[in-house]
Amino acid sequence: MTYPTLFIRKGKEQSLMRRHPWVFSGAIESETTSLKDGDLVCLMTRKNQFLGLGHFQHATISVRILSFEDEVIDQAFFDRKIKKAVDARLNIGLLSPDNNIFRICHGEGDELPGLVIDFYNGVAVIQCHSIGMYFSVEHIAKALKNALGESLHAVYSKSSDTLPKRQEVLDGYLLGSCETPHVAQEHGVKYHIDWITGQKTGFFIDQRVNRKILGEYAKGKKVLNTFCYSGGFSLQALNQGAVLVHSLDSSKKAIALTEENVSLNEFHEHHESIVADAMDYMKELQEDYDIMVLDPPAFAKHREKRHQAIQGYKRLNAHAIRQIKSGGIIFTFSCSQVIDKQLFTNTIVAAAIESGRNVRILEQLHQPADHPIHAFHPEGEYLKGLIIQVD
Ligand code: SAH
């Protein structure tokens, strides 16, 4: 099988030779007007040296590399890649009697750029971030069945939110079906997951390990979980014996999800929810919390928004630091990819200075093993957090 060839400008092939999986439009020497979004292309140097195969898109990132080998992108290709990703998760025990929620594929981290697959107790939800991947969803669904066998009952494809509107995208089941909300478990806690109406694929799996760590701090404590969505952090705290958890979100829908999850686990005696803006609530805080969780949505999705985002993180954290009781602990996060670990830490330090209180960093947190960062694609790092203690 041969794919249309695109030649890479002299000098621009270096990043591909270092196996970085993105090709920017300026690196391509060939005419691309006849290509359609999602076409498979072969990349070559001006000296006819093979560089890689990838999906083309009329965008700033023009090609995302699927393979650095000269091979055929067919069912067998997806079978190999998906099996490798599934085995990596099974090998570290992510599917166990008390856990059946994990990410099967994390885009570039699993050498499948543009492809996210999440697993919820027998159901895989595919979310494509590139049109080329979307064209392969049938292969991907089959590959999932081949890799997971009896552990997989249904595959749902959900890409209408993540692909450009110019592309017609249909969401739906590719294999089996499953009523929603569907109950799945994270570290022994049950959650209702609804991939059809929920945000992303239905749950924020990337905080699994950090939620477990929160549980370790929460016994006997009074916790405020801001930006709670479906109550992920709240439930792990309650499961480990928090005396009182307040879950806060500005979305009524998110609070309804949290309350359903609290009921599902019969934790209502120790839980209250609050619909409010996190910043406003924190400013006027009347309560004396031992622990606060700050897990806002990405304040900066693009580099140009970085300055504004830093101000946002600083303000939010300064409020929390000012308001928490003496000896209190704050779990603070940023999922903005354009704000790196160091910049985030500096921002928290600035917030501490502004608050006038003494702050120590106890632990540094990050994204879990099922959200791997490929060594040749450092841009894959996005989630960072700190556990801080305030005197
Ligand atoms: N911590 C969650 C995920 C957070 S997603 C988990 O573990 O699952 C971010 C959430 O922040 C969304 O539910 C969104 O509704 C909420 N949100 C956005 N802006 C907000 C604001 N200003 N105040 C409170 N909540 C907000």
Image (cartoon, rainbow, N blue to C red):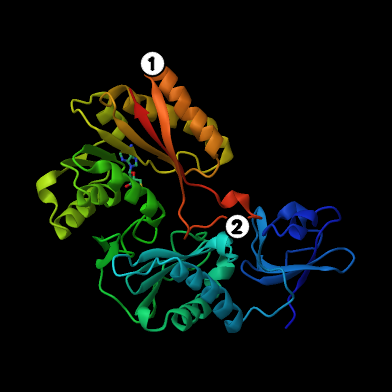
Q: Nearer the viewer, residue 359 or 281?
A: 359
Residue 172, position as x, y percentages in the image = 38, 73
- Which element type, helix, strand or loop, lies under badge 2? loop
What residue sits right under mark 2 in the picture? 374
Q: Give residue 141's position: percent from left, percent from top.
A: 46, 78
The quadrant of the picture showing ligand 1 is top left
- Other-residue count near label 1 (Cα within 10 Å), few / some / many at <14 / 14–19 / ≥20: few
Number of marks: 2
Q: Confirm or deny contact between disc 2 and disc 1 (CB under 8 A).
A: no
Q: Quadrant of the N terminus?
A: bottom right
Sequence-first disc among 2 and 1 = 1
Q: Residue furthest right?
A: 47
Image-quadrant location for residue 133: bottom right
Look at label 1 and name its amino acid.
Gly
Q: Nearer the viewer, residue 11 or 39?
A: 11
Within the image, what quadrant is residue 263 found in? bottom left
Tell me how far mark 2 sits from mark 1, CA to CA.
39 Å
- For residue 306, the mark is none
- Residue 293 lies, in percent from the top left, at 32, 39
| Residue sitting farthest toward the left | 269
Circle 2: residue type: His
Residue at the (18%, 25%) spot, across then down = 286
Quadrant containing the C terminus in the rendered view: top left
Can residue 277 be seen in the rendering of this structure?
A: no
